[in-house]
Image (tube, rainbow, N blue to C red):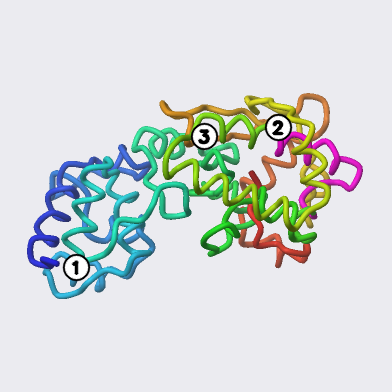
């Protein structure tokens, strides 16, 4: 752990980013070449005073804050690992909610301001969501391990299914299993062990999953049409489109309205109201983010 060097490193990464790079307005009068401290704090979900302490080398960030800082500052994989080492925190394994998100995907996510979008792993762990994705699907749960995977929750927690109409459940179950089998085939070594453990647990806990898994169907989910049940907007018909990362381990999902269904007007309303004026999400299991 070297908190003094961590502070210097954070300042150097902050100085290289322009506000437009992370979806922030530039403004006519700026005395710094990159982001201001308060802008980094905003992006990382921290208080300004706390972030100042980090740059001064007076505070050790938690593992959760290290994740947030790496994403706020658009660090690549090597820079992210360096931040963890300086902070005295273990580098998190790939595949979980703390996984490194490629800066290019974060940049695209920032630019998708009028449509729900999020980045997930090939095991359907939600890594980051934009504001509209949180408003439509709910925030990703603070789960770790297998519980962070939406596929795992889909087959083990009935509340996770409240996002879809009941009549759509069989098709979604088949899609999740066929996509999961394709994802596992692309993995190897320790990464394969993580996926195999997920499958083994689902085979033990879900007869539905077992029946579908034994069919050996395989289908990479590149696009789909879905009906999402929102507690205020009702059923929203969306096209789910997918952009894969270089190794296929991460995916950027964005959701466009299905023409002729009224979804465009529903998403426009969601864009205006966001998560503030729609009232509490009374949908069971509203902390289960969609993937």
> Residue at image x 26%, y 44%?
75
Q: Is residue 277 magenta?
A: no
* Residue 181 picture quarter: top right
Q: Give the residue number, with chain letter if any, for mark 2.
A: 178
> Residue at image x 33%, y 44%?
25
The residue at the far right in this view is: 167
> What whole-number distance in Å separates the C-alpha atoms at marks 3 and 1?
31 Å
Q: Give the residue number, with chain letter if any, for mark 1.
A: 54
Point out the tag, 2 or 1, that comes first from the N-terminus.
1
Marker disc for residue 251: 3
* Residue 267 picture quarter: top right
The x and y percentages for residue 189 are: 42, 39
Q: In the rendered structure, which segment of residues is drawn in magenta?
A: 162-178
> What whole-number distance in Å separates the C-alpha atoms at marks 2 and 1?
45 Å
Q: Is residue 173 magenta?
A: yes
Q: Which is closer to the viewer, label 3 or label 2? A: 2
The x and y percentages for residue 20 are: 31, 38
* Residue 254 picture quarter: top right
């Amino acid at each position: 752990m070297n908190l003094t060097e961590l502070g210097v490193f954070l300042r150097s990464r902050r100085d290289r980013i322009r506000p437009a790079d992370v979806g922030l307005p530039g403004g006519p009068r700026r005395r710094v070449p990159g982001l201001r401290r308060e802008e980094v704090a905003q992006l990382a979900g921290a208080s300004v005073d706390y972030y100042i302490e980090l740059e001064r080398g007076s505070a050790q960030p938690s593992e959760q804050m290290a994740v947030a800082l790496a994403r706020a500052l658009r660090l690549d994989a090597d820079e992210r690992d360096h931040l963890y080492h300086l902070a005295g925190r273990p580098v998190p394994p790939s595949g979980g909610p703390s996984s490194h998100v490629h800066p290019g995907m974060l940049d695209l996510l920032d630019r998708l301001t009028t449509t729900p979008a999020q980045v997930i792993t090939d095991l359907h762990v939600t890594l980051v969501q934009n504001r509209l994705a949180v408003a439509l699907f709910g925030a990703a749960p603070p789960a770790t391990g297998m519980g962070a995977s939406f596929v795992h929750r889909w087959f083990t927690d009935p509340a996770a299914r409240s996002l879809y109409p009941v009549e759509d459940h069989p098709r979604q179950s088949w899609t999740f299993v066929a996509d999961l089998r394709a994802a596992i085939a692309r993995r190897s070594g320790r990464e394969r062990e993580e996926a195999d453990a997920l499958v083994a647990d689902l085979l033990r806990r879900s007869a539905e999953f077992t029946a579908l898994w034994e069919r050996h169907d395989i289908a990479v989910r590149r696009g789909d049409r879905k009906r999402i049940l929102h507690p205020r907007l009702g059923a929203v018909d969306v096209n789910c489109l997918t952009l894969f990362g270089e190794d296929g381990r991460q995916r950027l999902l964005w959701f466009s309205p299905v023409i002729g269904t009224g979804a465009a007007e529903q998403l426009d309303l969601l864009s205006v109201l966001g998560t503030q004026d729609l009232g509490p999400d009374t949908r069971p299991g509203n902390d289960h983010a969609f993937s």
